[in-house]
């Protein structure tokens, strides 16, 4: 049985080993990735992001359990921690996950830590998600920690993005404002039994309203906002605010309903196709950049960059002049 | 008078216009950047990062005012908001700054918003900081919002990195743990008059101790940790924890002392040279990557990438196969 066949047949050990090859960018993985690619494009990719301490991981676990119980659809969880390039920050969450979800062969969990550049992690995550999609996982939950450019990069991989807040975090308007609202398709207030939940919801609603006013109603979550002058579609998605208590499985059914509605909206409005196009375009450009650098390096003396660096450190050349020389040595 | 002369002579309007050219990556700016480069390498670059709501901007203002009052050294403030690529999130902070610092020609403030990729912003920020350094600003304060990969990219531009916490933010260990501690040279608890300051300090100290235990005492803040087996220098920098109340100018003098001590440590230990080397190496590599893509694009039919994208969307080619074709069309 070939590796591709083993993966499509559900061999978990083969999958685990293959994902490691994919993450490490090993060349032999590429042929299998290519052969799997035509099978992809079926899964619902759901992004879950929010600050540490909002209970994201528990929420992701409950969503996975509920999807399994409701419909038997297969669920992959990809947990990405771009904020921690130095330490293995994902390990604690993994243990909680193992306890909740182990023993169910319809669930597969994969944690990924940052390896240097955001671009590298986003590319590796894109590939891992593509593998799950291709081999028959119906739902891929992509969980990221933190707030910032990394989340926006990862959000591009998802069809539906959940932004998770919790009372005590979300009641500071400034804390919410920082970019993350604009990628939210659904807002979740987890730990909704904590005091301050009303304040959190009020702050979120104010932010939503402000966002709509500022953006001239182009709709939150639109990575490619409608340009001025073009007609705005009649049916816009307004991000709902859903309260959950993940540890008590409260609000999970309502959240799953909302997720299903959003997927429906994407299909009917034509946004799904736009999102796919945008995502694949970004992936091609990223890959192109990586390959161009690799190709250039092969034609170089190994110490050319080091020699240029010395000239820059001694202030003989500017960085730009150094790169001119590297690209066109006399 | 040439633009370079105008900049070195302190023409603020010329500087403002030039920085816009630099940010936009306009080709005519490069010649001036190159001619300024030999003057750079003098400034103390100080990074200030932390979550929204910790009072970072007020702290930066007070630091600038105090440096001006103490020594008359010229101060540039570069405020970077990588978390908000869609909206002009930096504007509010700017107004506060204008009020506190306007009228002092020894201070120049520049806000930068994200333009797409983190790499692009980091490169633009590197250039703007280099300009301030070259034209005689003795201290460059680089302020970033949020926590994540973007901050680590920006931190590489700084010699000394301050991580700002505030009571009610920092008392959740998980919130602190997320990567950001590892870039801190100095930990600041701002708003130290708020309740909970003891908890915040205890949590920070625990994190520091944990970090040291995990890292085998290589010292927090070291972007290039000492490798196993090499001798660890006797004098290590242990990040101090400084309490401030920026709005009442409390703790600012102690913080400036600590900043000066850290710069001293960098010089004496040889770390300063290592940081400069690392920073310039990253800049050269980033620039090389950008120019390789530009060079490749010039040799292409304008619709080649679009044609490849269609094949990928129809699942005829994988993204990798599309890039193979773009680089080696039959």
Image: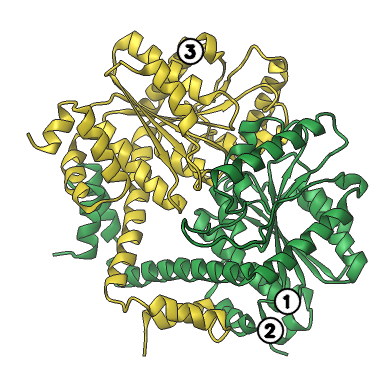
Chain colours: A green, B yellow
Q: Which residue is mark 2?
A: A3
Q: CA distance from mark 1 to mark 2?
A: 7 Å
Q: Is residue B182 above or below residue A10?
A: above
Q: CA distance from mark 3 to mark 1?
A: 57 Å
Q: Which mark is residue A26?
A: none
**Which quadrant, please, contains the C terminus of chain A?**
bottom left
The answer for which chain carries disc 3 is B
For the residue carrying disc 3, how many other residues have a C-alpha within 10 Å: few (<14), some (14-19), or many (20+)? many
Q: Which residue is mark 1?
A: A14
Q: Nearer the viewer, residue B266 or A77?
A: A77
**Residue under the image location 52 percent in, 15 percent down:** B246
Q: Nearer the viewer, residue A229 or B130?
A: A229
**Residue under the image location 67 percent in, 27 percent down:** B170
* For marks 1 and 2 on the same chain, the one whose residue lies earlier in the sequence: 2
For the residue carrying disc 1, how many other residues have a C-alpha within 10 Å: few (<14), some (14-19), or many (20+)? few
SS at mark 3 in the image: helix
């Amino acid at each position: 049985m070939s590796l591709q066949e083993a993966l499509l047949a559900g061999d978990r050990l083969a999958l685990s080993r293959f994902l490691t090859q994919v993450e490490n960018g090993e060349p032999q993985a590429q042929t299998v990735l290519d052969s799997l690619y035509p099978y992809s494009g079926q899964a619902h990719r759901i992004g879950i992001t929010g600050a540490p301490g909002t209970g994201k991981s528990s929420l992701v676990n409950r969503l996975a359990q509920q999807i399994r119980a409701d419909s038997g659809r297969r669920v992959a969880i990809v947990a990405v921690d771009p904020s921690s390039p130095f330490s293995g920050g994902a390990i604690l969450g993994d243990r909680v996950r193992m306890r909740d979800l182990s023993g169910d062969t319809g669930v597969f969990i994969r944690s990924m830590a940052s390896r240097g550049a955001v671009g590298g992690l986003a590319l590796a995550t894109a590939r891992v998600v593509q593998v799950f999609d291709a081999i028959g996982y119906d739902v891929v939950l992509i969980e990221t920690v933190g707030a910032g450019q990394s989340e926006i990069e990862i959000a591009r991989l998802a069809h539906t993005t959940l932004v998770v807040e919790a009372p005590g975090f979300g009641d500071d308007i400034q804390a919410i404002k920082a970019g993350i609202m604009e990628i939210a398709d659904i807002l979740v207030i987890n730990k909704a039994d904590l005091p301050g939940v009303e304040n959190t919801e009020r702050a979120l609603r104010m932010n939503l309203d402000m966002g709509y006013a500022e953006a001239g109603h182009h709709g939150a979550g639109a990575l490619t906002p409608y340009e001025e002058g073009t007609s705005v579609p009649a049916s816009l998605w307004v991000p709902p605010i859903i309260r959950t208590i993940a540890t008590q499985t409260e609000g999970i059914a309502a959240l799953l309903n909302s997720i299903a509605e959003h997927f429906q909206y994407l299909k009917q409005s034509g946004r799904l196709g736009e999102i796919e196009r945008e995502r694949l375009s970004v992936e091609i450009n990223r890959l192109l950049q990586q390959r161009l650098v690799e190709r250039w390096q092969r034609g170089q003396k190994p110490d050319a960059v080091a020699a240029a660096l010395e000239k820059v450190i001694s202030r003989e050349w500017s960085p730009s002049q150094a790169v001119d020389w590297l690209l066109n040595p006399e």
